[in-house]
Amino acid sequence: MQEFFATVSWQRAGQEFANQRYSRGHEWQFDGGLRVPASSSPLSVPLPMSVAANVDPEEALVAAASSCHMLFFLSLAAQRGYTIDDYRDDAVGEMGRQADGRTGFTRIVLRPRIAFAGTPPTADALAALHHDAHTRCYIANSLKADIIVEEAS
């Protein structure tokens, strides 16, 4: 078993608390020392209690799914003899009512635009790369929401 750690910290700093008007701004710290300013989404908790400039958990989940897919895709492409110069994914997560009645992510759509050096894969080979990356992605394997890979336009 592998373990991964993150430290999440928040301080009241003298703010009112019982009235729910405290800042949701907080910090994520990771094992390499990186600190990321985080907050609730302004869609969940209105401004000024949320910090719009900070990363929110929903954005982080979409980024994690996209990043995981990309990392497996790059590795598989290299193994199969393709060279990639650039990979950009404008991923979007959709939240809504799930089958059990709770609110959660119902889909994450990945829209990677990939620039290959040399001969790019055929449409079938590209689809196979995406399929294999998806089946290996730890994040995708951990979520209930569908994760869709669409051709970028």
Image (cartoon, rainbow, N blue to C red):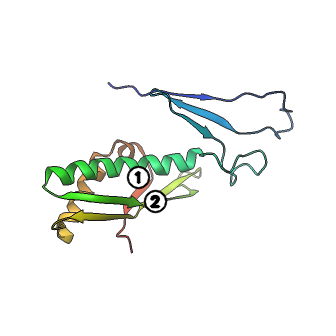
> In the depicted view, which residue is nearer to us: 89 or 118?
118
Q: Earlier in the sequence, mark 2 or mark 1?
A: 1
Q: Residue at x 19, y 67 (%)?
A: 120
Neighbourhood count class around disc 1 (C-alpha, 10 Å): few under 14, some 14–19, many 20 upward:
many
The amino acid marked with disc number 1 is Ser
Name the quadrant containing residue 77.
bottom left
Q: Residue at x 48, y 51 (%)?
A: 62
> Which numbered disc covers residue 138?
none
Neighbourhood count class around disc 2 (C-alpha, 10 Å): few under 14, some 14–19, many 20 upward:
some
Dots 2, 1 in contact, CB < 8 A: yes
- Examine the rendered structure and indicate whether residue 41 appears above or below residue 27: below
Count of numbered marks: 2
In the picture provided, is 68 more to the left or to the right than 136?
right
Q: Position of residue 83 (x, y in %)?
A: 20, 57
> In the depicted view, which residue is nearer to us: 47 or 53?
53
> In the depicted view, which residue is nearer to us: 74 or 115?
115
Q: Residue furthest left?
A: 81
Q: Position of residue 111 (x, y in %)?
A: 40, 64
Q: Pointer 1: what residue?
A: 66
Q: Residue at x 23, y 53 (%)?
A: 132
In the picture provided, is 72 more to the left or to the right than 29?
left
Q: Position of residue 146 (x, y in %)?
A: 41, 56
Q: CA distance from mark 2 to mark 1?
A: 7 Å
The secondary structure type at the circle numbered 1 is: helix
In the picture provided, is 101 more to the left or to the right than 110?
right
The secondary structure type at the circle numbered 2 is: loop
Q: Residue at x 30, y 52 (%)?
A: 134
The amino acid marked with disc number 2 is Ala
Q: Pointer 2: what residue?
A: 91
